[in-house]
Image: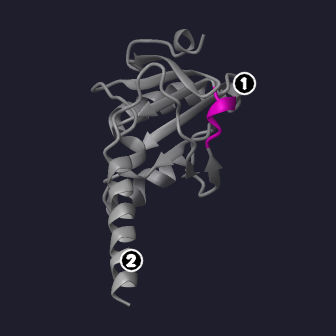
Amino acid sequence: MKLNLINRAFLMFLATGLTLSHAWAAPYAKGDKVEAFRAEDQHGNAFDLQPESTHYLLVSHDMETGKKANSILTNLGKDYLTSNKSIYIANIYGMPGIGRMFAIPKMRKYTHRIILADDEALISRFPAQAGKVTVLTLIKGEVQSIRYWDPTTEAVDGYLK
């Protein structure tokens, strides 16, 4: 009985440690393998990232930058991201409920798919620069480059080549 209790406590400690280490994992760097993840898009549809079949990950970390990027991506058409094997991820982690009541319905109006990152451990893996969209180039799921797109002043197509 005592041994069983010790085993359970150890397993709980181990599980907590693994969870915390994942939550505090360093942002992706060149050469890192991107981990698969599950999230939802702006319409509530499930999405499973398949890093091996994705060539570009675009990640907006703040609402203002996201609005600018979404405007450009919408103008490029519904299939632009898909045809470039690109996934667009928007950080909504920490967004208060009242903000979500307005932001998510607005996101539904965009023609391209927006993956909603609502998990601190997930969004913290992507490096960030203020006012820019992070663009990770992947080959077979491995980060080849990390660049930062300014949707206010730059076209996105130069980042997806």
Most distant residue in the left direction: 130
Which label sits in the foreground, 1 or 2? Answer: 2
Verify whether residue 143 appears in magenta: no
Per the rendering, the mark at residue 8 is 2
**What residue does disc 1 label?**
83
Q: Residue at x 72, y 24 (%)?
A: 83
In terms of secondary structure, where does tag 2 sit?
helix
Q: Earlier in the sequence, mark 1 or mark 2?
A: 2
Residue 92 in sight here: no
Residue 26 location in percent, x, y?
Answer: 33, 35
Pick the residue in front: 68 or 116. Answer: 116
Question: What amino acid is found at the position of numbered circle 1 in the picture?
Answer: Ser
Q: Quadrant of residue 19?
A: bottom left
Using the image as rendered, state which of residue 78 and residue 114 is in the foreground. Answer: 114
Q: Position of residue 52 (x, y in %)?
A: 66, 31
Q: Amino acid at mark 2?
A: Arg
Magenta-tinted stretch: 49-54
